[in-house]
Image (tube, grey):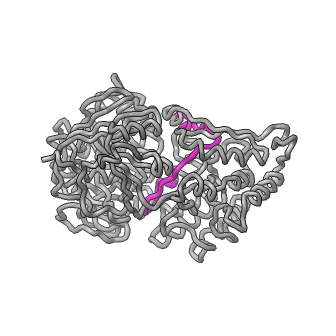
Amino acid sequence: MLKTICSGLLLAALACLTPSSGHAAHGVSIDGKLNYPAGFDHFAYASPAAKKGGGLVLHDIGSFDKMNPFTLKGTPPFGLDSFVFETLAVSSLDEPFAAYGLIAKDIEVAADKKSVTYTLDERAKFSDGSPVTAEDVKFSLDTLKSDKAHPSYQIYYQDISGAEILAPLKIRFNFAKVNRELHMIASQLPVLNKKFYEQNGFGEGAKGDPMLPPVGSGPYIVKEVNPGKTITYARNPKYWAADHPARKGMFNFDTVTIKYFKDQVVAVEAFKAGEFDFMWVNVAKQWQRDLTGRLFDSGKLVRKEFSHHNNAGMQGFLFNTRRPFFSSRNVRQALGLAFDFEWANESLFFKQYTRNNSYFSNSDLAAVGLPGEAELKLLKPLHEKYPNDMPPEVFTQPLAAPSTVPPNSLRGNLKQAQQLLAADGWTLQNGVLTKDGKPFEFEILLTGSFFDRIMAPYVKNLEKLGIKASFRTIDPAMYEERTKNFNFDMIVHSVGQSQSPGNEQRDNWASASADRQGSGNLAGIKSPVVDSLVNSLIYAGTQEELTAACKALDRVLWYGHYMVPNWYLAYHRVAFANKFKMPETLPQYYNPYQLLWTWWTEEGK
């Protein structure tokens, strides 16, 4: 999914009882369990004693050129979606399937599960002081489902057929199909200010300055913008939900400034010089060797690892199967055999990483062993109906990435790769892999030079197969534009997963999204088997059915060889200025920025 939706965690959702209930309440969960009762004071991972005040300086890579995070064209600044805009309800970060009302104070799921009714909090206000109404909510749904918005929203909300305004503060969403999590998906809807966008336009129809700060209901407003270079958010002193249970102890800094840097290598040096306060570290070398110097020695900068229970999803070298040379499963498998993870982990990563072994790594949704009875009920009929689209290994081989651990070896893997390529019609001519008179050549597109040392040995291994691969780092804005338009051969890509996968899987894998500009189906997968399993996942009636569908989909994606599996961490690596206070309790399902929003400094009051 799109970065602004994701942030890796898609349960930003609601306020209701269980899906089988017809009564309104303060919270909802898929499994019917809630940690927090009605009238709860605050989330356990936030502190009501947190002080408000002080300033926070963060960083991002590249630049930004718009103030609308909900459209396809252009790049919004970091934080705009979470600081300025709010959803009907918000997820609990210490529960896998639960969320609690924010703009919506009550949510009533119909007994037949075909609709959900929201009663809005009468206190909810936009930053211009105007009330949030059902008109704003309906406008938001209609706009995000239209072709004015990023196409990922259209896919994500496609089963919400429409909305009916029942009263100024009451609105019903109607569903096209029964879906056990659709009321939660509906509650993730960002609420837009209808008046602002009718006056100024939305997307391609926007009028005037693209840097015009938007009006939202969130805890911050846009204070100052230096286009493409910096943006400063100021805490709204009249924020309507400052004492709301789902917001208490959060968003404590008076100002948040985002500085933009050319690449992560430059950003690391700036951080070491004290130019910003917090950095989520995703490069092993930076964590192990680069984060040193005077400010670390003096204790002004510190490093810390934070445990989590996130579904790690999948990271890998992704093939664009729209390219003719990557349309073959044999070819994709062969190129996967050329990556020596064990050598990279030993020589480059300081043994920090675990190999991705699933599209749902580090979770109970990952396929293990051979398919069980529940998975076979899904897989066998599809095999009979689409025998050419079902990889045979799905039934005979557990998920396992290529390994060079003895008795395996890189030499043996490359020999197997040669056999796969030969079976697909590729032959070596003077050391060059060729088919139909054309050499096998492709480019790996990167956004940061820190991946060079990983790609260089991989490219050398491909050379042993007669493949000429090159890698190139380009500007982040250009990279984003090229990936939106599927204009690449191979990229490094990460597919985040929530604890309860759902509608976002359509955007990631379904045939309908393969040719839709800006979709998450970067691999260009068009498979009736995948489409059917995605639908089984989305419309699963129980947790057991969801788990079986995830595992079955996992197997089909894995043996489709759409990605060369990379690696993951079961903890977050964070470096930060030694000035923060933080709650005693960690959330369980979170990214480091969600953790940071619960911190504060002694500068506060």
435 or 327: which is nearer to us?
435
In the picture as drawn, the residue positioned furthest to the top comes out as: 208
Rendered residue at 19%/40% (across/down)? 236
Task: Tell me if residue 586 can be seen.
Answer: yes
> Which quarter of the figure has residue 57?
top left
Is residue 343 within the magenta segment? no
Rendered position, 554 above or below 478 = below
Q: Where does the image place residue 170, in percent across and percent down from the top left?
A: 23, 52
> Which quarter of the figure has residue 498?
bottom left
Q: Is residue 47 left or right of residue 29?
A: left
Q: Where does the image place residue 34, in percent across and percent down from the top left?
A: 29, 69
Rendered residue at 43%/62% (across/down)? 500
19 or 568: which is nearer to us?
568
Rendered residue at 30%/40% (across/down)? 192
> Which quarter of the figure has residue 355?
bottom right
Please provide the residue range marked out in magenta. Answer: 481-505
Q: Is residue 507 left or right of residue 11?
A: right
Q: Where does the image place residue 530, in percent across and percent down from the top left?
A: 60, 58
In the picture as drawn, the residue positioned furthest to the left comes out as: 605
Q: Where does the image place residue 432, in percent across and percent down from the top left?
A: 82, 41
In the picture as drawn, the residue positioned furthest to the bottom comes out as: 373
Rendered position, 18 above or below 433 = below
120 or 483: which is nearer to us?
483
In the picture as drawn, the residue positioned furthest to the right comes out as: 429
Q: Is residue 469 left or right of residue 420?
A: left
Is residue 489 within the magenta segment? yes
Rendered position, 122 above or below 549 = above
